Image (cartoon, rainbow, N blue to C red):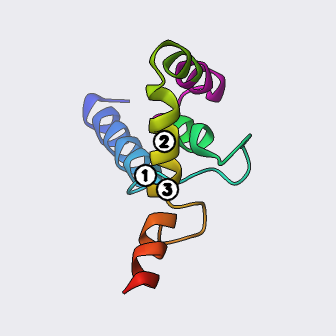
Amino acid sequence: MNTATADAGSATRNDQSLNDQPDTRKLRRSGEDKMLAGVAGGIARYLDADVLLVRVIIAVLTLVSGVGAILYIAAWLLIPADGEDVSIADAWIAARR
């Protein structure tokens, strides 16, 4: 195999791997990996992190300063659930109009 053939083969593999990646990631509350509202599961999936780590961070923020609970409730209201286009807050605002 010469270098031109090797370069052509690697270019083909690189183009294929780019096509295999999803075009966009959307932050959604998880419907499968949830304990309360699916916020931690959705954030973990979005960040490609362990859901336990996200839950521990939220718990620590809640115990230390209470900010974790506020952020969790805000995320629950503002992040749409899996399979939905609008969040709870968007639906509530649209219903009030």
Residue 25, label in figure: 1
Amino acid carrying mark 1 in the image? Arg
Which amino acid lies under the numbered mark 3 shown in the image of this protein? Leu
The residue positioned 36% from the left and 41% from the top of the image is 14
Quick one: SS at disc 2?
helix
- Give the Cα separation between the discs numbered 3 and 2: 17 Å
Judge depth for marks 3 and 1 and give the one in front.
3
Residue 80 location in percent, x, y?
51, 61
Does residue 21 appear left or right of residue 14 in this picture?
Answer: right
The x, y position of residue 54, in whole percent, is 56, 26
Q: What is the residue that sits farthest to the bottom in this orientation?
A: 97
Q: Residue at 74%, 40% (x, y): give it.
A: 35
Any mark on residue 77, and which? 3
Is label 1 in a helix, a strand or a loop?
A: loop
Residue 50 magenta-highlighted: yes
Magenta includes 55?
yes
Q: Residue at x 52, y 39 (%)?
A: 72
Quadrant of the frame with the C terminus: bottom left
Compared to residue 28, the image places residue 91 above or below, namely below
Q: Position of residue 53 (x, y in %)?
A: 59, 20
Magenta-tinted stretch: 46-58
Give me the residue at 59% from left, 21% from top: 59
Name the spot of residue 27 as percent of width and height, x first: 46, 51
